[in-house]
């Protein structure tokens, strides 16, 4: 038994030794693989970064070509400087743009402090031998820009590197000038490094001669050894583990195409592997603990004899490299077109794991054209080049997307492999299409549109603006919209407008402006303030329409309505004068009789003092009656314009007083259905009185030439729910059916032209609907009064209580 236990212990120790040796050997292999993985990653990122830098510098190169048009026109210095400053807004990677003359002195600049500075071009590389217009780059310079106002010299080993200068000579035909741009190195590094999340990683931008231009490594001692400088000068690209600044470093660099730049990506070898070593220590401790536990269990099982040894060791460790967790799509393809590695984003969106043994061009997600292109590119890929293209691809969900694909090649273990990086630009393409459609709408809108910057300087106008104002785009760009100011509006008007715009971001109203020809026009305008995602004001957008013709038509309509209103009043005036004449006959007769009696008494002393006093009292009462009649008449024609609350029944009684003589003469009675009911409404009292007069006169005239025993006009006033109702109807027999539908039309009348004009009821409807916000209806009504059946016309007015 002891022999068996000893043998088991010896075998167990031997197995432990083998396991520990295997673990250490596996860790060594995994460490090498980790280094290779990091090397592959920085190869990938240096390729991406140098491609982005090439695009950026290419954009700057194109920018210098665009400056030729500006400088050839020989415009004013202020305009050129302003244009250079505007270009900086669209090119954030540039700190300043400077134009140098043939003596290398700054003559134009986006930074006015740079003017007249003398620039030393001795350090700029490469030296132009055959072509003078090549792009050259100078050494780095401390500070934000050429702020010190002195001739520019460059330090070689600046600590706080903010920018580096690039230079290009351009030919204007009559002279040659140089364009000097200060490039924001920090901005480029931050933009390129925004998606890289690796600790102890540094990015350097160098000239091809090895001179450092910009870096995110801010250590005080920053020196490259001679071997690395030689590699940079001799090779376009390189990847490996080297000694950098006396430290072991995982390094990869790539040179730009057509430009004198090198982008280098570095990882601190020791610090990069610290995390891995900590994990390996934990792994070893875990293995040792498991081994000890296993030995204890084996000994325990040997002594109990009733348990079986069952041990299973399973190790499954898989490293997740960075690009598998990235938001962009990435895959590595071998020289035969097979997918070697693919990140989760790419795999889960477009490919099936069951089909990963196919060539990249055989997958069904590609269209036929894309398949042909991919096969041709992989089989004939040009060495040391990058290829970029937009490809259409169908996802596993069946939706088509647009990818911006960049393919680059690299050599690993003696074989060529290809890195395919793709970004989903489907949304970007949709927005570009929407922007194009919006531009079409902008250009073809019938309303004029003006877009200004936050300082209210015009940046864009549409064709409708040019048509309405007479100014074309070139005449208003950069100017304030107050060039259209007519002077009709007071300053307080504009102060209130801007106050509302600042507080609410919106203003709408009418303006009188002046076009290019000096002609005035009226516009209806809406102004909106536009804010960016940070709630910062960026633009104002104004949309306006010319309403001059509309205003003229409204004015004509108002004048027409005013004329109709006056005609209606004049028509009623004839009725009033006749009524007054009848009302004045009796008091004038009384005054005449009383005066004759007083005269007789004066001549013959015929009456007593008491009788003379009665005569005088009669005369005073009669004159007072005449005065009241004149006041009623004058109040009826008084031009009131202010809306007030007034009593409806009182207003109706005023109208009855004006025509009561005619009513008495024709034996017409007026009956209020409810003597005690009345209410107030808000409006212009004389206008309402005119409506009542028109309705009462029409009711009176309805009895003309009719033999009716009891002539009655009924007035019914009441409130129901949220409505105020006024009814005026008679027992004159009603209105003919072929007439009643035209009763409110202007100039329509069934009376003789010497009696009516046909505008009274038209104006009554206008006043009720427009001034009192009510409704008026007419109908024939059958009713019973004092046990007798009658038929007559009823006018019904409904006004909401909120009036």
Image (spheres, rainbow, N blue to C red):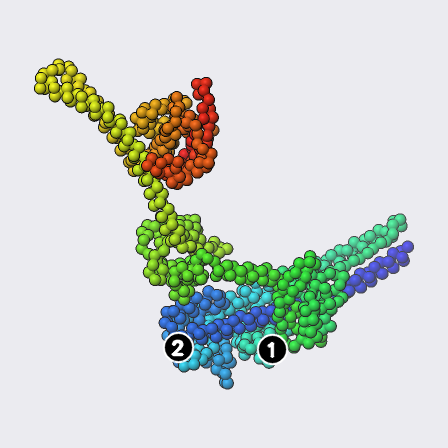
**Which of the 4 quarters of the picture holds residue 610?**
top left
From the viewer's perspective, is residue 558 above or below residue 455? above
Binning the other alpha carbons within 10 Å of mark 1 as few (below 14), some (14 to 19) or many (20 upward) gives some
Distance from disc 2 to disc 1, alpha carbons, whole Å, reads 35 Å
Give the residue pinned by disc 2.
Answer: 105
Q: Label 2, secondary structure: give it.
A: loop
* Element marked by disc 1: loop
Q: Is residue 379 above or below residue 688?
A: below
Q: Of callouts 2 and 1, which one flags the residue occurring earlier in the amino acid sequence?
A: 2
User: x, y (%) of residue 55?
Assistant: 55, 71
619 up-or-down from 528: above or below? above
Q: Position of residue 600 (x, y in %)?
A: 12, 19
**Furthest-right residue in this view:** 1
The residue at the point 24 percent across, 23 percent down is 586
Q: Is residue 647 left or right of residue 415?
A: left
At 82% from the left and 52% from the top, the residue drawn is 297
| Quadrant the C terminus occupies | top left
Q: Quadrant of residue 689?
A: top left
The residue closer to the viewer here, 35 or 743, is 743
Pointer 1: what residue?
236
Residue 67 on image: x %, y %:
45, 73
Q: Are marks 2 and 1 in contact (CB under 8 Å)?
A: no
Q: At 67% from the left edge and 73% from the top edge, which residue is drawn?
A: 377
Q: Nearer the viewer, residue 166 or 148?
A: 166
Position of the N terminus, as image quadrant, is: bottom right
């Amino acid at each position: 038994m002891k022999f068996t236990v000893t043998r088991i212990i010896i075998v167990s120790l031997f197995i432990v030794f083998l396991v520990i040796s295997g673990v250490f050997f596996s860790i060594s292999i995994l460490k090498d693989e980790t280094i290779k993985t990091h090397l592959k990653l920085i190869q990938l990122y240096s390729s991406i970064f140098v491609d982005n830098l090439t695009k950026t510098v290419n954009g700057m190169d194109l920018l210098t070509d665009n400056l030729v048009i500006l400088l050839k026109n020989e415009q004013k210095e202020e305009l050129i400087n302003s244009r250079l400053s505007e270009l900086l807004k669209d090119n954030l990677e540039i700190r300043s743009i400077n134009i140098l003359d043939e003596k290398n002195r700054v003559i134009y600049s986006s930074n006015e402090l740079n003017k007249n500075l003398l620039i030393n071009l001795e350090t700029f590389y490469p030296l132009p031998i055959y072509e003078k217009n090549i792009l050259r780059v100078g050494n780095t310079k401390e500070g934000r820009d050429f702020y010190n106002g002195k001739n520019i010299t460059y330090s070689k080993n600046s600590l706080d590197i903010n920018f580096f200068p690039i230079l290009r000579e351009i030919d204007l035909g009559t002279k040659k000038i140089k364009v000097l741009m200060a490039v924001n190195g920090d901005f480029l590094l931050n933009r390129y490094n925004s998606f890289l999340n690796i600790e102890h990683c540094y990015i350097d931008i160098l000239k091809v001669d090895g001179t450092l231009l910009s870096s995110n490594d801010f250590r005080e001692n920053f020196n490259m050894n001679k071997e690395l400088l030689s590699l940079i000068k001799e090779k376009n690209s390189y990847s490996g583990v080297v000694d950098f600044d006396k430290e072991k470093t995982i390094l990869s660099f790539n040179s730009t195409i057509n430009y004198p730049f090198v982008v280098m990506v570095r990882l601190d070898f020791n610090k990069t592997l610290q995390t891995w070593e900590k994990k390996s220590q934990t792994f070893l401790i875990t293995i040792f603990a498991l081994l000890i536990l296993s030995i204890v269990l084996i000994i325990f099982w040997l002594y109990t004899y009733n348990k079986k040894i069952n041990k299973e060791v399973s190790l499954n460790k898989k490293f997740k490299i960075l690009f598998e967790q990235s938001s962009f799509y990435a895959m590595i393809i071998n020289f035969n077109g097979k997918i070697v590695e693919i990140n989760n984003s790419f795999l889960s969106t477009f490919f099936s794991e069951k089909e990963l043994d196919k060539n990249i061009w055989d997958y069904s997600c590609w269209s036929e054209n894309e398949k042909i292109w991919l096969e041709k590119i992989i089989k004939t890929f040009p060495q040391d080049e990058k290829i970029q293209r937009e490809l259409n691809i169908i996802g596993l969900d069946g939706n088509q997307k647009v990818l911006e694909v960049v393919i680059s090649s690299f050599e690993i273990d003696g074989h060529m492999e290809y890195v395919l990086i793709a970004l989903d630009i489907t949304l970007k393409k949709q927005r570009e299409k929407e922007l194009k459609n919006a531009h079409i709408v902008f250009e073809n809108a019938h309303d004029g549109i003006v877009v200004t910057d936050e300082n209210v300087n015009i940046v864009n106008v549409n064709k409708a603006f040019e048509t309405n104002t007479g100014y074309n785009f070139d005449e208003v760009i950069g100017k304030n919209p107050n060039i259209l100011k007519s002077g009709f509006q007071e300053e307080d008007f504009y102060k209130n407008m801007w106050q509302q715009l600042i507080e609410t971001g919106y203003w709408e109203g009418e303006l009188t402006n002046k076009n290019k020809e000096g002609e005035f026009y009226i516009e209806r305008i809406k102004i909106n303030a536009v804010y960016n995602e940070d709630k910062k004001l960026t633009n104002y957008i104004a949309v306006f329409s010319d309403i001059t013709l509309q205003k003229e038509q409204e004015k004509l309509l108002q004048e027409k309505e005013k004329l109709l209103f006056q005609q209606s009043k004049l028509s009623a005036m004839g009725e009033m004068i006749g009524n007054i004449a009848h009302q004045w006959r009796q008091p004038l007769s009384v005054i005449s009789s009383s005066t004759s009696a007083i005269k007789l008494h004066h001549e013959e002393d015929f009456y007593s003092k008491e009788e003379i006093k009665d005569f005088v009292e009669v005369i005073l009462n009669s004159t007072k009656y005449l005065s009241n009649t004149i006041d009623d008449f004058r109040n009826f024609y008084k031009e009131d314009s202010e809306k007030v609350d007034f009593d409806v029944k009182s207003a109706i009684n005023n109208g009855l007083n004006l025509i009561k003589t005619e009513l008495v003469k024709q034996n017409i009675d007026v009956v209020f259905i409810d003597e005690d009911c009345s209410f107030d409404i808000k409006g212009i009292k004389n206008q309402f009185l005119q409506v009542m007069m028109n309705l009462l006169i029409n009711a009176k005239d309805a009895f003309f030439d009719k033999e009716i025993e009891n002539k009655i006009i009924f007035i019914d006033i009441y409130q129901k729910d949220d409505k105020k109702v006024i009814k005026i109807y008679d027992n004159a027999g009603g209105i003919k059916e072929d007439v009643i539908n035209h009763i409110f039309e202007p100039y329509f009348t069934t009376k003789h032209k010497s009696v009516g004009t046909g505008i009274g009821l038209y104006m009554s409807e206008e006043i009720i609907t427009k001034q009192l916000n009510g409704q008026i209806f007419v109908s024939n009504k059958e009713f019973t009064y004092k046990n007798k059946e009658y038929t007559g016309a009823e006018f019904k007015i409904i006004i909401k209580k909120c009036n």
